[in-house]
Image (tube, helix red, strand yellow):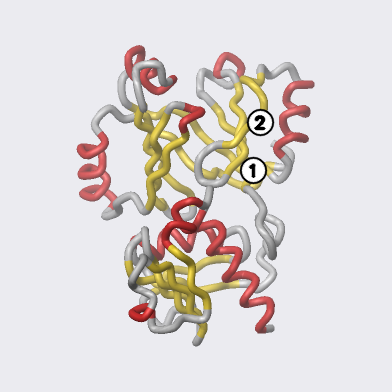
Amino acid sequence: MDGMLRLEHVGIAVDDVEGMRCVLADVLGRTPYKAETVEAEGVRTLFLEAGGSKLELLEALGPESPIAGFLAKRGPGMHHLAFEVADLAAETERLRALDYQILGQPRPGADGKQIVFLHPRGTGRVLVELCQQARYGGASDPGVHPAGEITVASGELGDAIAHALTRHFAVVRTDSTPLVRVSGTSDAPTLTLDGWSLSVYQPGDMDSAGMPDVRIPASVWRGLPDPWGVLGDLVAARLRTAE
């Protein structure tokens, strides 16, 4: 596929979210690092890092959700494969010209993506999603690693920032003197980077944040369409400034 960068995630439709959390914790030793509701698609999504790509758990918001229809017809299981592309509009038109049926128009999806689906009738009965990452100030082109390799501390929050940083760097997970560390919680993380720090704080917690270089209110953090993507872009911008 021209312009395809990588397998971005595997979507899994679930009717027992907590049960699947337990299964994945047992099998992979991982739990979701973030949850996001996409009202327009009728789904609540949970994301897990899975060795450079992701798993996306899809929960129906109600009986009218497409996921509810999928579960009623086929039961829980793999829902779609998502591939990140460099130019979603160009790829959509290229495939349309090859007589693939495009389901709707490119639109906002979860995790700060623009998405579109291909009808499974033309893709071996597998629902295929094409997605393009939203761009933020200071972001380099997806797939380009201008600063080479970057090390990130292991752990669930490390999973979240590691995935965001793959747009900028070749990421290596390590517990031995990593360049990037993330502590706290997914709602209020603190990131440290070679003497520089950024903290998301709750009201009343400003003094306990240790006076980081950058402070983001938790209300702003929760309102971002892709907070970890923004954080990854800030890290990349910081590293380029320091060069």
Which residue appears farthest toward the bottom when viewing the image? 195
- Quadrant assignment for the N terminus: top right
Of residues 41 and 88, which is closer to you in this image? 41
**Left or right placement of residue 136 versus residue 22 in this view:** right
Disc ID at residue 106: 2
What distance separates the C-alpha of mark 1 from that of mark 2?
10 Å
Which residue appears at 71% of the width and 45% of the height? Answer: 86
**Residue 179 drawn at (x, y percent):** 49, 79
The amino acid beneath tag 2 is: Pro
**Image position of 199 with respect to 32: above or below:** below
**Left or right placement of residue 197 versus residue 142 in this view:** left
For label 2, count other residues whose C-alpha is less than 10 Å away and answer few (under 14), some (14-19) or many (20+).
Answer: some
**Residue 199 drawn at (x, y percent):** 44, 72
The amino acid beneath tag 1 is: Gln
Disc ID at residue 73: none
Secondary element under disc 1, as helix, strand or loop, is: strand
